[in-house]
């Protein structure tokens, strides 16, 4: 009878792998299933800005996710892209440096950019006047937001982005986390990278902090069965191309799980193919056999980046242990962990 009760509450196909993943997560102090706010609540507010992170915190996300880069004067900042064109007015503010990397700018220069208006133009249905002129955030500022409400205590899920461009960034991060007292509680911080060297450096500097090796099918990661890159394929629809990509073999997938373990990772962050496609849709690396293999090797699975119920159903049924999402509110409601207020109300209550 009790078993029937549990079955009625849980996504059916997810049951097979829920056990091992939950246990692995508990051992690391990581919520299960984990709600990871990808660049903050970036569906509803400009990615990696204050309203995106405040909203994710107030919604109750387990982790605020950020991509770590470093300014020319050595300050750690949260920016996803290699350059600033998509998410700021760099082309108008610094026309001669439009495509320069983040590392070419001082903090003062980055702070002079408008990192919010692009969102209003790209998503007029979610635009807000108070998004205009938002600033790029430092890691310190993201930490301040994470700690900004004593009733909420999201962790940080930090990716070293293009780490080859930032020698020593892993040590800088360790120094910052230590100085700010963020290493006090197991699982409060999770570290992630696509780059195995960076992961090994994180392991050297922060051996006690859980780490995730990010996976995708393509250059620098899992070899595709097709043997082709998107560019070589001549296709125009990136999501459709990636949706067809598979690892070259089971052994190739397994090789990357073994890399993760060898680098000291406690899990992987594989890509997902989204039903609706789009820019954040990649190869489906959370097929049930893949998640089973990961769990058998003692690895957690945190999939990126899923926003819709149809895909929440799919990845949970396949046995993942956590989800990177741009829509923390949707995912928390899906997990029956709704906030008292909706996204718009929270933004308004916080001055946006
Ligand atoms: O960090 C997980 C996921 O964010 C990886 O993809 O490109 O959005 O950083 P990306
Ligand atoms: Ca990321």
Image (spheres, rainbow, N blue to C red):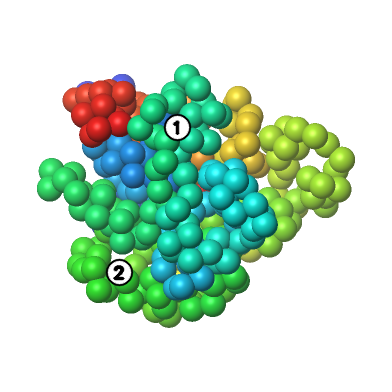
* Mark earlier in primary sequence (1, 2): 1
Quarter of the rendering containing residue 165: bottom right
Residue 327 appears at what percent x and percent y? 41, 32
How packed is label 1: few (under 14 Cα within 10 Å), some, or many (20 or more)?
many
Task: Relative to 308, say whether 54 is above or below.
Answer: below
Q: Which residue lies furthest to the top in this view?
A: 125
Quadrant in the picture for the C terminus: top left
At x 80%, y 34%, the residue is: 236
* In this rendering, position of residue 4 left or right of residue 268: left
* In this rendering, position of residue 152 left or right of residue 284: left
Residue 172 appears at what percent x and percent y? 40, 75
Circle 2 — which element? helix
Q: Mark 2 points at which residue?
A: 177
The answer to whether residue 178 shows anywhere in this view is yes
How packed is label 2: few (under 14 Cα within 10 Å), some, or many (20 or more)?
some
Q: Are marks 1 and 2 in contact (CB under 8 Å)?
A: no
* In this rendering, position of residue 177 left or right of residue 268: left
Circle 1 — which element? loop
Quadrant in the picture for the N terminus: top left
Quarter of the rendering containing residue 132: top left
At x 34%, y 68%, the residue is: 209
* In this rendering, position of residue 38 left or right of residue 121: left
Closest to the observer: 251 or 77? 77
Residue 332 appears at what percent x and percent y? 31, 31
Residue 83 appears at what percent x and percent y? 60, 55
Q: Name the residue under label 1.
A: 43
Task: Relative to 110, say whether 328 is above or below.
Answer: above
The answer to whether residue 321 shows anywhere in this view is no
At x 33%, y 48%, the residue is: 63
> Which label sits on residue 251?
none
């Amino acid at each position: 009878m009790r078993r029937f009760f549990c079955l009625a509450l849980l996504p059916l196909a997810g049951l097979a792998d829920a056990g091992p993943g939950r246990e692995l997560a508990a051992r690391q102090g990581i919520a299960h299933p984990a709600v990871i706010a990808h660049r903050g609540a970036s569906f509803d507010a400009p990615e990696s800005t204050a309203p995106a992170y405040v909203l994710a915190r107030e919604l109750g996300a387990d982790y605020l996710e950020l991509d770590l880069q470093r300014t020319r004067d050595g300050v750690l900042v949260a920016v996803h892209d290699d350059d600033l064109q998509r998410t700021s007015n760099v082309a108008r503010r610094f026309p001669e440096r439009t495509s320069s990397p983040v590392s070419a700018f001082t903090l003062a220069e980055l702070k002079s950019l408008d990192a919010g208006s692009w969102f209003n133009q790209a998503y007029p249905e979610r635009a807000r006047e108070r998004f205009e002129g938002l600033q790029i955030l430092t890691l310190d500022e993201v930490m301040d937001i994470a700690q900004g409400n004593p009733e909420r205590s999201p962790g940080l899920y930090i990716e070293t982005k293009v780490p080859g461009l930032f020698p020593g960034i892993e040590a800088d991060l360790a120094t910052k986390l230590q100085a700010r007292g963020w290493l006090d509680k197991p699982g409060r911080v999770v570290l992630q990278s696509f780059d195995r060297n960076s992961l090994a450096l994180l392991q050297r500097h922060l051996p006690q902090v859980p780490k995730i090796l990010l996976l995708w099918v393509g250059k620098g990661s899992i070899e595709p069965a097709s043997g082709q890159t998107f560019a070589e394929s001549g296709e125009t629809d990136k999501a459709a191309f990636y949706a067809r990509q598979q690892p070259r073999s089971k052994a190739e997938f397994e090789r990357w799980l073994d890399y993760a373990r060898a680098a000291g990772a406690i899990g992987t962050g594989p890509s997902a193919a989204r039903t609706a496609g789009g820019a954040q849709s990649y190869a489906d690396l959370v097929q049930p056999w893949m998640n089973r293999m990961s769990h058998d090797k003692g690895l957690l699975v945190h999939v990126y980046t899923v926003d819709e119920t149809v895909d929440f159903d799919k990845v949970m049924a396949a046995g993942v242990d956590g989800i990177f999402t741009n829509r923390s509110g949707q995912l928390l409601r899906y997990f029956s962990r709704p906030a008292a207020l909706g996204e718009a109300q929270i933004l308004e209550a916080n001055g946006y």
